[in-house]
Amino acid sequence: MWAICSVAQPNVGSITLLRDGDGDGRADSREVLLEGLAGPNGLDFLDDWLYVALEESIVRYPFDHAAGAVTGQPETVVSGLRGGGNHWKKTLRFGPDGMLYLTVGSSCNVCLEEDPRRATMVRYAPDGSGETIFAEGLRNSAGFDWGPDGHIYATDNGRDLLGDDFPPCELNQVTEGAHYGWPFANGDGLADPDFGEGNEALVASSVSPVYNYPAHNAPLGIEFLEHPSLRSSYRGLAIVALHGSWNRAEKDGYKVVSMHWDDAGKVSSRGFVWGFLAATR
C-alpha cells in the first residue's frame, strides 16, 4: 500500500497528493487530487472520508486510502462560516474523542467580532451537527494538536501595531470553556490598549499562554512527534513552524522550532530547522 500525504494550497484552491511507494519517507510522486476549491486549508481523514475546511464551509469526500483517490462527490457538513478578513483560513482536525475541531481566525487585527465563531475553536460531530464554541479569545490559531498528556495545544498569533516586541505570540493549552484573551488581553493577562479598559473582568479571567514566542514570530502549524520509530529524545516533543515577522524592524522567526516539556510542565523552545530568512532578503 502507498503511504500518502495530502497538502492544501489555499491561495490556488487545490489539494496535492504526495505518494511514498518505497517507504523511505520521501515522496516519489505528486499529483493534483482536487482543484477549483474556495480556500482549502485544514485537512484530515476520518474513516473513509477526507474532510476539507474551506473558507466558508467544511466538506468531505469519499476516499479510497489504498488507491489514494477521491471516489465520489463532496458532501457539505458545515455551511455558513464567515470568510474574508485578515485570517480567513481555517484549520480542521479530529480529536481522540472522534469529534471535529475547527479554528476560525479573527477578521481583523483587533476588534469586536460580529460572528461569535471568529477567533475561536469550534467543535462539531463528524456529520457537522452539534456546533459548540469550545474556546474563545484565540486571535489566529492556525495550528493545534493533542499532546501526549491528552491536552490540546494551539499556536496563536499576537496582534500587530504595538511595536516590535509586544505582544508575544503564544502557545496555549486549550481547554473547553476557556477564554485566551483576544481582543481584551495580550500575553500573560496584560490589558489591551484598545479593548482592555472596561473589560477588566475578562482580562483577569483570561488564560495565559504556556509559552510566549517573540512578538510577530507568527507560529503556525504544530505537530507532536509520537511515532515509535523516532529516537526517544524526539518522542513527545512538538514541532512548530514560525512564519516570521512582516511588520518588525528587525525580521525574526522564519524557522521551525521544537517545543519541550520538563517534568514540572515548563515549556521551552529550541531551534530545529532554520535558514529560511536569507531567502527573504
Image (cartoon, grey):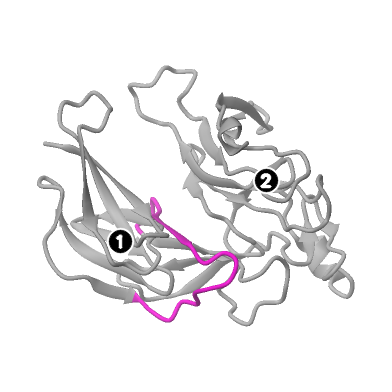
Residue 220 appears at what percent x and percent y?
55, 47
Answer few, some or many: residues within 10 Å of disc 2's Cα (few below 14, many 20 plus, some between 14 and 19). some
Task: Specify which label sits upstream in the sequence, 2 or 1.
Answer: 1
Q: Which secondary structure is most common in the magenta stretch?
A: loop
**Membership of 94 in magenta stretch:** yes
User: In terms of secondary structure, where does tag 1 sit?
Assistant: strand
Closer to us: 77 or 133: 77
Q: Quadrant of residue 18?
A: top left
Question: Which residue is disc 1 drawn over?
Answer: 51
Does 127 appear in magenta?
Answer: no
Which image quadrant: the C terminus?
Answer: top right
User: Which numbered mark, 2 or 1, is in the foreground of this view?
Assistant: 2
Q: Is residue 100 left or right of residue 76?
A: right
Name the residue: 77% across, 51% down: 187
Quarter where residue 33 is shown = bottom left
Please, is residue 93 above or below residue 111 in the view?
Answer: above
Residue 104 screen position, x and y as percent: 53, 66
In the displayed structure, 236 sits above or below 88; it is above
Locate the N terminus by quadrant: top left
- Residue kind at label 2, given as amino acid type: Ser
Residue 245 has which mark?
2
Which residues lie in the magenta part? 78-98
Determine crowd level at label 1: few under 14, some 14-19, many 20+ residues with C-alpha closer than 10 A. many
